[in-house]
Amino acid sequence: MTQHTQPCPCGSQRPLTECCQPIHRNPSLAIHPEQLMRSRYSAHVLGLVDYVVATYHPCCEAEQHREAIAKSVHSQWLGLEVISSEIATENEGFVEFKAFYRDGNDQYCLHERSRFLKETINGLPQWFYIDGEYPEPPAPDESKPAPAASDKIGRNDPCPCGSGKKYKKCCG
C-alpha cells in the first residue's frame, strides 16, 4: 500500500497524506482541537516522538519528559474512538476519546477528556495539548462480576492518589 492510499491511523477513513500528515509537518494547520488530538494519536502510531513533544503546551515542559513520552509513543496503538469535541472559548477546547493500546500481552483503554489551549506562536494560532481528566466511570453493574484487580498501573491510567491526573503526570 503506498503512502498516498494508506489510511490515516486516526480512524478518519481519509488517506494519511490528506489527514494528519500535513498537521505533523505544520501543527498550526489544526484549526480544531479534535484535529490536533487525532494528529497526536496518529503520531503515537507512527512513532513521531518529536511531534508529540512539540504539541504539548509550553508550560508542560514536555522536553523534560521526552523519555517517558517516547515510551508511551512506542506502545502498540490499536484504535481511536472520539466521543465528543468542542471549542469552549476562543482559546480553549476539549476532546473526549478512548484510545486502545497493547502493552505486552495486556490490552488497555485510555479514556480521557483532554483540554487544549490555543496560543499564537510566530504569528500563527496553534492548538496545544495541556492536560486531561478521566471521566467518571459508570456505576458498576451489580449483575456482573468485578474484574480481577491488577497491581500494574499504566502510565496513562488515573493516578491512584485520586488527583484526577494521569499516573505519569502525578505520582509516576
Image (tube, rainbow, N blue to C red):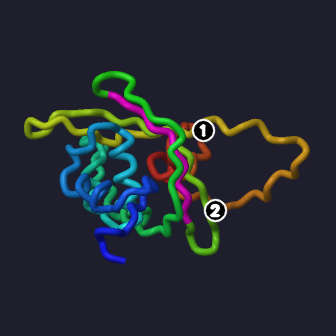
Disc 2: CA contacts within 10 A as few (<14), some (14-19) or many (>=20): few
Front one among 166 and 124: 124
Quadrant including the N terminus: bottom left
- Magenta stretch holds residue 100: yes
Q: Which residue is mark 1?
A: 162
Q: Position of residue 14 (x, y in %)?
A: 38, 57
Identify the image quadrant of residue 63: bottom left
Q: In this rendering, is residue 138 above or below 38?
A: above
Q: Which residues are magenta?
A: 92-101
| In this picture, residue 89 sits left or right of residue 159 | left
Q: Residue at x 44, y 47 (%)?
A: 169
Q: Earlier in the sequence, mark 1 or mark 2?
A: 2
Image vertical order of residue 107 relative to residue 135, above or below? below
Q: Is residue 149 left or right of residue 26?
A: right
Work out whether residue 64 can be spotted. Answer: no
Q: Most extreme residue toward the top, as rendered?
A: 89
Image-quadrant location for residue 53 = bottom left
Query: Which residue is nearer to you in this view: 135 or 100?
Result: 100
Q: Residues within 10 Å of mark 1 (few under 14, many from 20)?
A: few
Element type at mark 2: loop
Spatial CA distance of label 1 from label 2 is 16 Å
Marking on residue 152: 2
Q: Residue at x 36, y 65 (%)?
A: 70
Residue drawn 31% across and 64% down? 48
Callout 2, which amino acid? Lys
